[in-house]
Amino acid sequence: MICVVGGGLAGLSIGYLLKGKCVVFEANRIGGLLRSEKIDGYTFDTGGSHILFSNDEKVLSELLQFLDDYIEHRRRAFIFYKGRYVKYPFENGIFSLSPHERFEILKDFVENLLKEKKRPKNLLEWFQHVFGNAITEKYLKPYNEKLWKRDLREISLDWVGGRVPNPPIDDVLKSAVGIETEGYVHQLRFFYPLSGGIEILAKNIAENVNIKMEAVRRIEVGDKIYVNGEEFEKVVYTAPLKDLTKIMRDAREIRENIEKLEYNSLAVVGIGVKGKVPNIHWLYVPQEDIVFHRIAFLSNYSPEMAPKNCSTIIAEISNPEKINEGEILEGLRKVGIENEVEIVKTWRWEFAYIVYNHDYRENVEAIKKFLLRRNIIPFGRFGLWEYLNMDMIWKKAKELYESLSCDIEQRQC
Ligand SMILES: Cc1cc2nc3c(=O)[nH]c(=O)nc-3n(C[C@H](O)[C@H](O)[C@H](O)COP(=O)(O)OP(=O)(O)OC[C@H]3O[C@@H](n4cnc5c(N)ncnc54)[C@H](O)[C@@H]3O)c2cc1C
């Protein structure tokens, strides 16, 4: 029998694929970050804005099969820049800026292409290297500093790896001369459940999973593996690596590596709105004097997310200190939401974003090695300590299932 620690999407996916061969331990609530709550008729995705998209059509269609009914969207995402909504990604939205700013960006972009450059060593240098100084200073730097809450030179290039696509040069040039283009195209088309919010995905997968609502407090490894005193052949660990020292006594050996792992927390503020809001999906807010970095208009994902003639918004704040409702309301007014609004509830998530610092790779590798030697397989966003979206979780769950099945078959031979 295999023990899966954690019943978020990662634990549920591998639990679903392994069927009767495993038990999933969940400490809190099934679904992890995929959680939705209905309050006073408003449905909030309490783990932040979640949409289904993928550049792998097979993965996408397999995930969609878990939804009873869903809506397909063409992304309408914007950046709040100098008091107006500029189409996202910024480099594709330049067409809507003043001719003076378009020229400034274009000149800088072309000069940057022509000049001899040193290899970038951190996220800030990478932005300057690929996009030039103008796009970096106007949007990428302020937005990312707000999200990561640190100097971007502290973030290594491990984070970039395919996640922030290089803009096609044509796109930037076209946009700068006033021609509208689309960027980050594999997210341009996305899907969302018709009702119930994003949690419905986790709930539907969980229907066929053997779940035990119990926190894993102790993993002991000798000849066998014991989880909370129960014997298992293997463990798939999807809880945060940061928690290992609490759960495994011999994790003292890698305490230093664990301590060096960095992450950001998140607050999600649920807001009920009387009347209609802008007909967009989400808005990035780099502006320093507005407390949230992103707001998502969930009732534009599905009308069932709000009561009639009302709208549902969530605001996301990275590494929040204390949430000041007045600041949220002021921020909403600044981005143009003048309706009657009510802050319904705030949810806090200790683990939301993995920070790829400069010794990221070295520490994560040391921890993974330690676990694998003990037949504990790290998995999921916080178990692998990787910036994984839902499609990658499902894809990796299938790969893990294949390798576990091979192991099981070999032992039976
Ligand atoms: C703000 C935000 C927005 C996102 N938006 C998108 C998006 O639009 N599209 C997309 O594809 N992906 C998105 N993602 C990524 C997506 O949330 C993750 O890929 C996915 O939810 C990760 O699932 P997981 O199971 O790895 O982790 P989690 O959801 O964190 O699940 C881990 C589970 O382990 C449980 N646990 C912890 N400790 C123990 C213990 N000791 N014993 C038992 N159980 C334990 C927890 O309670 C939790 O249920 C977003 C993520 C964030 C933070």
Image (spheres, grey):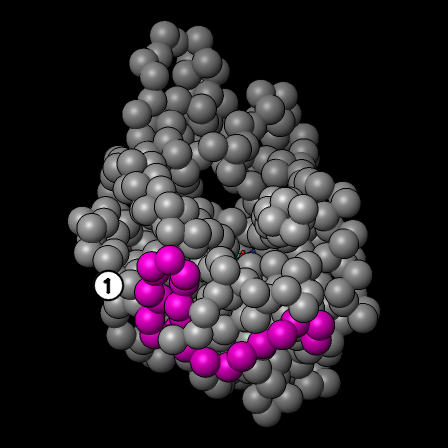
Question: In the figure, residue 312 lies in which quadrant?
Answer: bottom right
Q: In the image, which residues are magenta?
A: 207-227
Image spot of residue 311 (x, y percent): 63, 77
Q: In what element is the residue under mark 1?
A: helix
| Left or right position of 394 against 267 | right
Q: How many marks?
A: 1
| Left or right position of 137 against 410 | left
Image spot of residue 299 (x, y percent): 66, 72
| Residue ID at (26%, 67%) | 246
| Residue ID at (41%, 38%) | 159
Where is 185 relative to 230, above or below? above
Image spot of residue 111 (x, y percent): 42, 14
| Left or right position of 96 against 106 | right
| Residue ID at (70%, 75%) | 207
Q: Main secondary structure of the magenta part?
A: loop
**Residue that lies at the very extreme toward the front in this rendered image:** 413
Image spot of residue 291 (x, y percent): 35, 64
Residue 347 can be seen, yes or no: no
Q: Residues within 10 Å of mark 1 (few under 14, many from 20)?
A: few
Say which residue label 1 marks: 249
**Residue that lies at the very extreme toward the bottom in this rendered image:** 40
Q: In this view of the protein, which residue sits in the foreground, 126 or 379? A: 379
